[in-house]
Image (cartoon, rainbow, N blue to C red):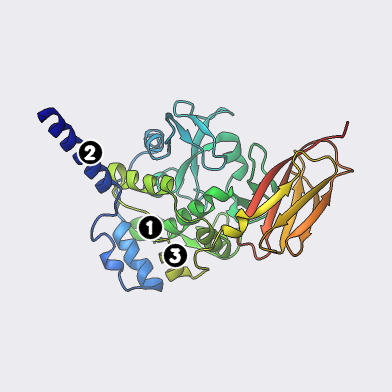
Amino acid sequence: MFRFFYKLVFVFLTFSVSALYAQIPAGYYDAAQGKTGEQLKAALHNIIKGHTEYSYKQLWDILSATDEDPKNHNNVILIYTGISRAKSKHGGDPDDWNREHVWAKSHGNFGTTPPAGTDAHHIRPADVKVNSLRGHLDFDNGGTLVPGTDSCYKDDNSFEPRDAVKGDVARMIFYMATRYEGDNGEPDLEVVDYVNTYPKPEMGKLSTLLQWNAQDPPDNFERHRNNVIYNDYQHNRNPYIDHPEYIRAIWGGPEAINKNPELSLSVYPNPVVDRLTIESGEKQTMNFKLFNNLGQVVASGKILNGRNRINLNNKTPGLYFLRLTEENGRWTKQYKILKTISY
């Protein structure tokens, strides 16, 4: 009886501590209540500034905790590829992961110096090769497929991450523009509605980032990451993970976007011999691009009234990537397509 009682108390306490750990601290955002625009941004800056700083070297351990794979505690999840890789496999070799500054450190020239250069709220594990290809590019939609990824794209002046982390990227960029306002020699960072911002202390593209924040709301991984940074390391939070609506209250942009239309898509047959059919139960207008294995566009066009067929008769057998984008850019979806030959 006593053993059962103690076990019950232990379970209750464990649950209570876990629940407390996962919550926003009471009163944390009180100073932001009722504010919008620049007043809200200033209030949030005052709440999150002056965090506990760490060295660039210490980020290996910090990122191993913040980005731990929930299904394999020996691994971390890489931001742009979604790959789970061993925590120990970090460094500069091609198959390693390294420390990616989502707000490129050259945009403001803060390098790897605290606080901005080691702020875990915008630094994520990334595949070395993909990180190198992203470089110091701004963020926007479009380009050709990034080698080593299934759904990242880049052109000469911008980089588009996979759909599952587009909101994460946006909220990290808006965090940096709020946390760093030029106080005490820190950089003064701004989000702008254009690209080619290097080496200014700016990142773009604002309108695209607002769209990404709306289409990809915070998930459990992102919220857990925010909690770990707050509780165990820096003791400040990314307010836009806790309250993504604050972004709209400051910078504008769309409200949360319903992703259900994306779920009604059908692409068949796959593998395909000659004609690929695309259908949407929502009868939407969409744009499509078909990429070969080298990331080159080999076909493109529109899907009108929710249905179209793409002729692959003249295409070489192999792996292709079909990218569908809603007409107004509210969401994108990518499929791996295997082109075969008939026997």
Q: Which residue is mark 3?
A: 247
Using residue 4 as the reference point, say whether residue 185 is left or right of it. right
Q: Amino acid at mark 1?
A: Arg
Pointer 1 or 2: first along the chain: 2
- Decide which of 195, 222 is in the foreground and name it: 222
Horizontal relation, residue 26 to residue 146: left or right: left
Looking at the image, residue 18 lies above or below residue 283: above
Residue extending farthest to the left is: 2
> Disc 1 marks which residue?
179
Please report the residue visible at 74 percent of the width from the left and 53 percent of the height from the top: 278
Say which of 280 and 334 sits in front. 280
Q: Are marks 1 and 2 in contact (CB under 8 Å)?
A: no
* Residue at 66% from the left image edge and 54% from the top image edge: 265
Query: Amino acid type of disc 3?
Result: Ile
Q: Is residue 75 above or below residue 16?
A: above
Q: Mark 2 sits on what residue?
A: 14
Q: Amino acid at mark 2?
A: Thr
User: Which picture quadrant has residue 231?
Assistant: top left
